[in-house]
């Protein structure tokens, strides 16, 4: 059994702003000063049912929960 947990906070998100077709470009990339938080938990269960020189039978089962939220928008 293994367990993983993470939390990542980042700001200055790079977003694409649509531009008129007459400019020749589809989007303009801009820095958006929002604070975004990503966090999650993952649990993995592993069981080896059979093992020989030529064959390995392993069962894996994963549970995960991920969450993304906006913490601050100026």
Image: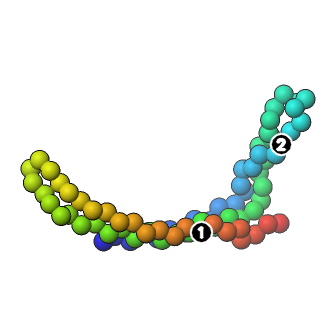
In this image, 16 relative to 53: left or right?
right
Image x and y of residue 59, in percent: 27, 62
Badge 2 density bin: few <14, some 14–19, many ≥20, Cα 10 Å = few
| Relative image position of residue 60 (x, y in whole percent) | 31, 63
What residue appears at the point 90 percent right and 29 percent down from the top-left corner?
22
Along the horizontal axis of the image, is 13 left or right of 63?
Answer: right
Rendered image: mark on residue 67: 1
Q: Using the image, tell me which numbered label, if any, was put on residue 18.
A: 2
Residue at position x 43%, y 69% from top? 63
**Local secondary structure at mark 2:** strand
From the viewer's perspective, tell me whether residue 24 is left or right of residue 45: right
Residue, x 87% and y 32% (percent of image)?
21
Asked if residue 21 is positioned above or below residue 56 in the image, the reply reads: above
16 lies left or right of 51: right
Q: Nearer the viewer, residue 66 or 58?
A: 58
In this view, 52 is above or below 19:
below
Seen in the picture, residue 26 relative to 49 is either above or below; the reply is above
Task: Give me the C-alpha separation between circle 1 and circle 2.
Answer: 27 Å
| Visual colour scheme | rainbow
Residue placed at 79% from the left, 39% from the top? Answer: 27
Quadrant for the N terminus, please.
bottom left
Residue nearest the observer in this picture, 35 or 27? 27
Quadrant of the rendered image containing residue 35 = bottom right
Q: To which quarter of the image does residue 74 belong? A: bottom right
**Residue 68 x, y percent position in the rendering:** 63, 66
């Amino acid at each position: 059994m293994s367990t993983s947990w993470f939390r990542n906070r980042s700001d200055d998100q790079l977003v694409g702003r649509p531009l008129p077709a007459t400019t020749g470009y589809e989007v303009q990339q801009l820095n958006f000063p929002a604070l975004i938080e990503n966090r999650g938990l993952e649990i993995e269960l592993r069981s080896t049912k059979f093992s020989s020189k030529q064959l390995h039978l392993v069962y894996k089962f994963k549970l995960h929960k991920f969450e993304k939220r906006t913490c601050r928008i100026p």
